[in-house]
Structure formats: C-alpha cells, structure tokens
Image (cartoon, rainbow, N blue to C red):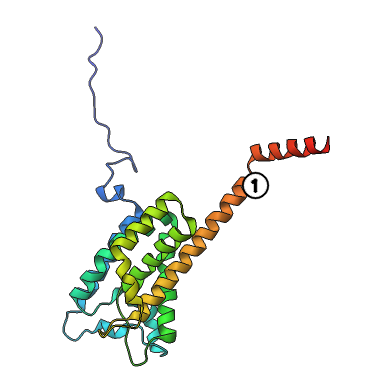
Amino acid sequence: MPEEITSIKLPDLPGQGPVKWYKKISLNLRILLALAATLWAIEIIDLIPGINLDAFGVRPRTLGGLIGIPLMPFLHGDFSHLLSNTFPFLILGYIVLKAERKTFILATISITLLGGLGVWLVGRGESVHIGASGLVYGYFGYVITRAFIERNFIWIITGIVVLFFYGSLLTGALPIHDQPISWEGHLFGMLAGGWFGWRRSKKKKELAIKKEEEDPVKKILEEIRKKNGED
C-alpha cells in the first residue's frame, strides 16, 4: 500500500517571512510620516523646564544663526503653531512625494536649505525664525510651478485644487501682517520650492526630447525621408 502523504510546515527561510505591515507603506511616505512625528516629539521635548529649543532657529546674519537653517522646520512656538503646519505639511508633502518619488528627500532638503539661507541673508534683524511653514510654502511653490510649466491634465487639476484650498498662502509671503510671523520664511520657502519645481520640469522636458531623438522608429523614418529627398 502506498504510504500516506502528510503536509508539514517548513520553517520560513531568511527574507521569506510575513511582510511587516509598515513595509507595505512606501519608504518615502514612511519618511514623511516620520518627519511629522518628529516635529511633535521635538515640541513635546521643548515643554521640559529649562529647555528652549526655539532659540536654535534662524537668526539672520549671525554666525550662530546658521545652525537654524536645517533646524528651522523642526521648531515651533507652541502646539497651535505646530498643528497649523502639520496638515498642510502632510497633504502638500504627499503631492510632492507622489510627483518626485525617488527624489522626495532631495526636494525637501533643497527647499529647507535654500529657503533657510534666504531667511538668514535678508530676514529681519534681532529675530528668530522657526516653523515648518517654510517647507509647506516650498511644497506649495513646487506644485504651482510644475502645474504652470507642464500644463498637462494631471498637473493642471492638481494646481487648481491646491490653489483652491491653499491659495491664501500667497498672502502669507508678503510683509503685510501685524502678527509675528515669518513672512520671509514663507517667501523664500516658496521661491525655493518653485525653483526646484522648475528644475524638475526642465529636466523632464530634456529627457523627453532625448528619448524622442533616440527613438529607433523615428530614426528610420528620418532616414527614409532623407533618402527620398536625395532621390
């Protein structure tokens, strides 16, 4: 008689175990959420008596104020300030994330450094500039610039939606407010984001032209046209 066949469970091989839930989320999206969580963690730490992290913001035209350029987006005056930045940071940041994918981190770093440098160079003296709003404005500038330059259906719709919900951000980049807000951070963040968006659109156009020039079918058609012209 044939032996009875039974099933046995083999141990999971290295790298073949169950996929952890967080690995189902793209790396860049995890980084975006981690950045938001970091903002809140830093603000909680800033509540500890004797700690004043806000002092490490951008201090225009001072040597010590240079440290604030990379730190500015992580520092907030209070939780109300942080909350007002968190949602647009996640929404606009996610749009940039979907557009950039592999270079989202580069976009974020570029906006942070260029925007912060602009604040350091021309910001009001005897002031400290803090908040992730400069980064939010950078994402806003990026989206609007790409929508304006590329003008394809997806970008036009995205630009219209962003303008509808966040168009009021434009007034925040002007020196017309009585409140102690960093309009300089808003302005230079938006300019930095616009520059990055323009740069990416330009590179995309150059790649499209290069790909079209290298198209083998197009080359054959060009050769046929040239040959017919010579005949």
Disc 1, SS: helix
Quadrant assignment, res 130:
bottom left
Most distant residue in the bottom direction: 126
Reply above or below: 19 against 93: above
**Quadrant location of the C terminus in the rendered image:** top right
Please report the residue visible at 33 percent of the width from the left and 60 percent of the height from the top. 162
Q: Is residue 84 left or right of residue 163?
A: left
Q: Is residue 143 left or right of residue 177?
A: right
Reply above or below: 149 against 46: above
- How many numbered marks appear? 1
Where residue 186 sits: x, y (%)?
35, 76
**Quadrant location of the N terminus in the rendered image:** top left
Q: Amino acid at mark 1?
A: Glu
Question: Residue tagged by mark 1?
Answer: 213
Quadrant assignment, res 49:
bottom left
Please report the residue visible at 60 percent of the width from the left and 47 percent of the height from the top. 211
